[in-house]
Image: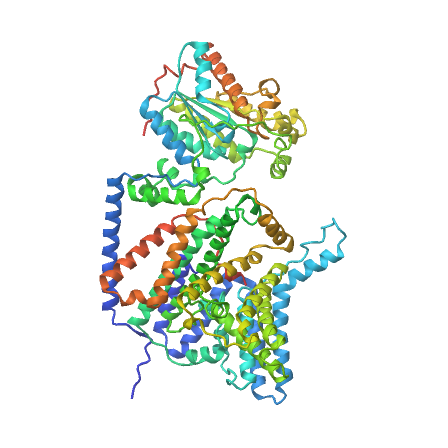
Amino acid sequence: LTITSLVFAGFVAFVLAGYYLLPRRAQNIWLLLASCVFYITWSGGLTVVLAAFTLANYAIGLALGRTPARRSLLWFGIALNIATLVVFKYGNFFIKQAQDLLTPAGNSAASGALNIILPLGLSYLVLQTISYLLDVSRKQMEPIRNLIDFALYLAYFPKLIAGPIERARTFLPILENPRHVDDATIARSTALILTGLIRKLILADLLSSLLAFTPYVRRPDDYSLPELFFWLLAHTFALYNDFAGYTNIARGVSGLFGIDLSPNFAFPLFSRNFTEFWNRWHISLSHWLRDYIYTPLSRALLRRGYGRSHILSFALPPLLTMLSSALWHYVSWPMLIWGLMNGVYLIADRIPIILGKPVVPPDTWPLWRQVLGAITVVILWTLSNVPFTTSSLTSLEQFVTQAFSAPTAVWDWPDVRIVAIIIPSLALDAIQARCGEYVVLSWPRPVRATVLAFAVLVLVLVTRIDWNIPPFVYQGF
Amino acid sequence: MMTDERTLRVSGSGVFKTLALAALMLIALSAVLEAAARLLNTPRSTGINHHQFDGAWQHLAAMANEGKIDCIFLGASTVHRGFDPSVVSQAYQTATGEQIQCYNFGIGQMNVWEAASLAEILVDEYHPALLIYGIGPRNFFPDNNELTKADWTRYTLGKPTISGWLIHNSHAYSTYLAAVRWYRFSEADLHEKQTRDGFEAFNGIGTDQDLRPPRHIRQDMATYAISGEAVDAFKSLLALQDRGVEIVVVEMPLPESYLKMFSSEKNYHKLFTGHIQAITDQQHVLFWTTDTQPLIPRRAWYDYHHVNAEGAALLSTWLGDQLAKAVLSGLLSNPATVSVPEAIP
């Protein structure tokens, strides 16, 4: 049930029909059933893992609400969640490392003997359950006593496979209260779904189809440096539109049920420094990392007497936060380099603190500095995605060496096909950033209808072609 | 007091008005785009996911506009790079005094299923007197089958689809497919330097490394066998002779390094040419094998299965001579003088 497929549209229509007809008390059960069906279509037998995971966290949450010795139970809960992630997500990496160590050179007979399959969406679920256990333990919310509501919080199908990562304390009240869907909700949801489809099926997929047949990672010396950078830039825009498109569709679909999901992107490629970038890119993850790693770590360091300008307070929280983010994505040496690079970018934002100057928010910068800042962010972020696209340290090293060792390729203009997609992507962001996410709804009806007709026409035409591209990048986590 | 528990509270009128207007706009927009495409006579495409196909099809159409097509060479890149229609025609004319007009419709990786579909379309559309099908062992693997699956092909062969209908009847839709083609393939792919009769030579002499088949080919050939489905497709192509076209199957030459994959030349003949010979004999179709050693010297190879420009000249001269001999001995009719009837619907 890929969320851009017609089958998924039919599934949503069926679930919506039942949902609107049922009384409120039965709606959550109906949504949970639909979510289970949705998950089974993706992960089949692994639904049992999801069920066990849900029950375990439900029980720990309840116990945390009443046990006096909460601290050890909390750590047990967190350890259990991390252990689940380590086994299912990182198991293959550790097995391979162990095999490489134990197997004599040149003998690869044992490799691939065991392959652990990751239950879809587990990385998102683990973050949600950890935040839930922490919030209950900190008395920021009561434990959820209704098992249906708790299971639905985790398994709610629009956000199940790629987020947004919702917090129980904000999501639960929506599940516990009546939901209403009116004309305005439907209009907003439709706008979100259409924007999401345009981002995913047109902007992301067209760039991905080019990237799939361009060996710029394997043979960088075939390209001049500017060409290479444009291909990397294409990857940045493909990744952005792919994930932002998914989030828009998920939010739009959820909106039809009267359930608002958090926005995950706020035009990140217009960010003027990396602190701002991480408040605009994959926001639900960034904020999770901020609330449960960055801020507690910073406070702990301050409590131990390390002042704000001390090297530890200054560098450790951003570095550890971004390394955690890297590990959350997947375990590989290039990914750790990605985390390190982004940690360093965040540290660079804090240089004024060391110099004893105040950190000035970007909104107050002069225009030239804002533009320069935005360009710098896009360039540095694009460069940090080089490790994201390479699978091993060897291929990363090969890429960097070949790219910079006097490339044989002559300078050429960037491929016009990349530019043809990047410009509309930037234009869409610029319009939405300036006039709001639902700007189209404020236009007169004939204009709205024309935009809708054009969007439908383009989407129908694009989906007629088999572009041979992989599904959403972030749904594999 | 009763509370309204309904989730859905839609008045509907606003939403439906917008949807109705959007539907009208969609129709109007489609009409405007169609009119504009026709007025501007924009480039069109068949939508087949192969960088060479549209070019080959359009070149053939242009050539047919200038005069009758006597023969068509069909096959994969070995044919595209191996048979030069002008050289074949020259050799044929030298031997017979007659001139023939040939077109090379070789496109990369065309397998026997694709060749069978395309041959049927070409015979129905252009009524050539002679179809020369160049084959090699790899043409009998299923691979992509892009051409067979394509809406254009299916529709042209009489299997109606909406897309197929649109490709044939909507100028705007086929222009959109031309834009997709531009987007899909690099400039270098789209602008190959082929002659107007479809041929394109490889320049340069292959090194020993170039002549060594890559690993995936070696793996394919290790357990080589022609499947029953491939034989059926091959037979359906040969059956086109019932429509008045004469068919000749030609074994494309291969270097020693390629034949070694079959452990021995004898084994190659047993698994490939012997099998093909049996089928062509059964269907009463001429099958010409090429004795590589004297025909293509080492310097005339470009890589492990393509000849270079010198090899193409040698091969094309050989083909022209073979054709002339066959016509003079009465095995084939003279393509220049044969009149092929229109296909019976």
Residue A349: give x, y in percent of width and height.
Answer: 52, 70
| Foreground of the two, B219 or B315 | B315
The image shows residue A222 at horizontal and vertical percentages of 55, 43
Q: Camera-side residue: B82 or B236? A: B82
Quadrant position of the N terminus of chain B in the picture: bottom left
**Image quadrant in which you'd find residue A19:** bottom left
Residue A413's x, y, as percent?
45, 45
Task: Give me the residue at 63% from left, 88% from top.
Answer: A69
Q: Is residue B220 left or right of residue A268?
A: right
Q: Is residue A468 above or below residue A430?
A: above
Residue drawn at the location 57% of the way across and 88% of the way down: A66
Tell me if residue B287 can be seen: no
Q: How is the image coloured?
A: rainbow
Question: In the rendering, at what x and y percent does residue A471 appear?
Answer: 48, 56
Give the quarter of the figure containing the C terminus of chain B: top left
Q: Which quarter of the figure has residue B333?
A: top left
State whether residue B37 appears in this view: yes
Count all numbered tags in the image, as a single digit.
0
In the displayed structure, A197 sits above or below B344; it is below
